[in-house]
Image (cartoon, rainbow, N blue to C red):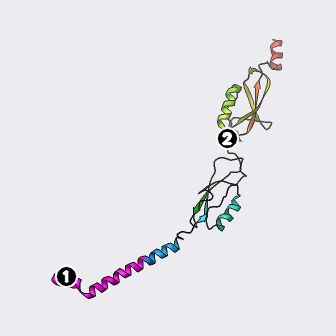
Amino acid sequence: MKHFFNFLKSRAFLINLGLALLAVVILTFGALQWLKSSTNHGEFVEVPDLSKMSVMDMRKIIEEADLRYEVVDSANFNPEYPRFSIIEQNPPAGNKVKQNRKIYVTVNPSGYKKVTVPNIIQVTQRNATSMLRAVGLDVQRVTYIDQLGKDMVYYVKFKGKRINEGDKLPKTSKVELVCGNGSIPDRARVQADSQ
């Protein structure tokens, strides 16, 4: 044990200890400098404003800024933005980010998603209007025909053509309800008079 304590006090041990500490300091300093240069410490890129840009233009801007991107699908069409343009981005424009950072963009689809026409035949006009609004369709106008059921829906039209339950229409489409006016149709009146 005495030899061990003598060795700790020896000049050779102290020189080796000093050299080891110097090596640790040099390695730590070198590692920090390498990390600083490889992570671009203190160097930031400003996120460009991609709003309303086409996907092709967005790609070019992102590449010029040394950034990456990922397209996130959009569920709802926004009529205020051009089709297939950027409607949202994360992080937002103006933020400072590192080079090669991924920017998440949401693209406006080509149009409204399609919704299914509900069964509104033989339903009152008021209830039919509520059912259509619930799925995202609007009633543009109501026309009447000679049918006994007053304000009862007999059929539905879209752009002048008759449509059926289960047909798919773009959300926010405007349809026409054809309802009864409470009058007996001429054929039924003729048959009733002949009896």
Q: Kindly identify which residue carries mark 1.
A: 5
Q: Using the image as rendered, state which of residue 24 and residue 113 is in the foreground.
A: 24
Q: Using the image as rendered, state which of residue 88 and residue 4 is in the foreground.
A: 4
Picture layout, residue 71 above or below residue 115: below
Q: Using the image as rendered, state which of residue 63 and residue 13 is in the foreground.
A: 13
Q: Position of residue 94 (x, y in %)?
A: 62, 59
At x 57% / y 63%, what residue is drawn? 97
Q: Amino acid at mark 1?
A: Phe
- Check if residue 181 falls in the magenta segment: no
Q: Kindly identify which residue carries mark 2.
A: 115
Q: Position of residue 190 (x, y in %)?
A: 83, 16
Question: In the rendered structure, which segment of residues is drawn in magenta?
Answer: 1-28
In the displayed structure image, the side of residue 15 where residue 4 appears, left or right: left
Picture layout, residue 25 above or below residue 185: below
In the displayed structure image, the side of residue 164 where residue 74 appears, left or right: left
Q: Amino acid at mark 2?
A: Val
In the displayed structure image, the side of residue 169 where residue 33 appears, left or right: left
Picture layout, residue 44 above or below residue 75: below
- Which image quarter: residue 175? top right
Dot 1, how many residues are within 10 Å of its Cα: few (below 14), some (14-19), or many (20+)? few
Dot 2, how many residues are within 10 Å of its Cα: few (below 14), some (14-19), or many (20+)? some
